[in-house]
Amino acid sequence: MNKTIISPSILAADFADFGKAAAEIDASGAKWVHMDVMDGSFVPNITFGPQLVRALRKRTQSFLDVHLMIVQPNRYIREFADAGADGITFHFEAETHAQKVLCEIRSLGKKAGIAINPSTPASMLEEILPFIDLALIMTVNPGFGGQSMIPQCLEKVEKLAKMREKAKLNFRISVDGGINENTAVQAKNAGADVLVMGSAFFEHSAKKTLIDRFQG
C-alpha cells in the first residue's frame, strides 16, 4: 500500500517569492511540490510555465509534481521534462491520444499522471490504468484555488481504489481541490495517497505539525 504524501500547491503561495515557498515546503517535511500550469484556455486562469519549474528545480530536491491544465499538453511534455519535472500529469479531457502521451512521459524517465475533472467519471480511465503512475481526481472545478471540495468526487477515489486493487496495479491516487485538515481525513479514508494542499498548508502556523499529522 502506498504511503500518504502531502503535495503543497505553490498556486497558493506568494507569487513574488516562490523560492521561499519551496523552502517552507522542504522545511515542513513534505515530499512533493505541486505545480498547477494553467493556460487561460483549458481553464479560465493563467499561471506559469516551464521556466518556474526550472527555477524551482535549483531550489529543492522535492518531487516536482507538475499538473498541466492546458490544451494539447502533448506539445509541452518534453519541455517540462527538460525543465526538471519529476512527474507530469495532464487532463484526460484535453488529450485525444492519452495512452500515447503517458508512454512518452515514461520514456523520458518521468512519472506519468492523468487527471479528470469533477464531471468526468472514473470509469473513463479504466483502459489506461496500466500506463499511469498517478491518477489525479479534481475535487473542485479547476482554474482557481480556494474553492470548497465537492464531496461527491471522493466516490471516484473509492472507485479507482477498487479498480486498482482488482487490476493488481500500484499507481497513486491524488486529490486536488479544497483539501484542508478536515477534508484530508475524508480523502485518505476514501483511498487517496496524495493530498494536494494549497492555502490550508501555506496559511498554517505550524506546517511541520500539519505534515506530520497526515503524511506517512
Image: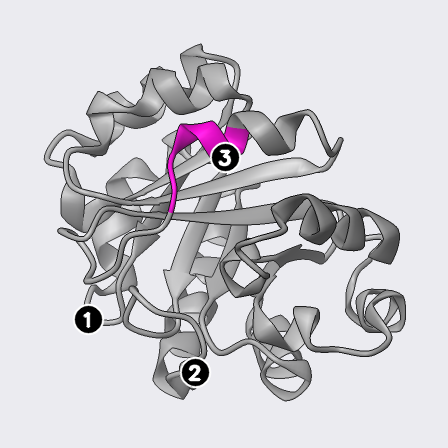
Determine if the magenta segment contains residue 4: no
Q: In the drawing, does residue 203 fall left or right of residue 126?
A: right
What amino acid type is highlighted by mark number 1? Ser
Q: Is residue 128 above or below residue 135?
A: above
Residue at the far front: name it: 16
Magenta range is 48-53
Whether residue 208 is visible, yes or no, is yes
For residue 149, which numbered disc appears in the image? 2
Q: Secondary structure at mark 1?
A: loop
Q: Secondary structure at mark 3?
A: helix
Q: Is residue 207 above or below residue 9?
A: below
Residue at position x 81%, y 65% in the image: 211
- Name the dominant secondary structure of the magenta segment: helix
Residue at position x 37%, y 18% in the image: 79
Identify the residue under disc 1. Answer: 119
Residue at position x 38%, y 35% in the image: 49
Q: CA distance from mark 2 to mark 1?
A: 14 Å
Q: Position of residue 11 (x, y in %)?
A: 49, 59
Residue at position x 23%, y 33% in the image: 73
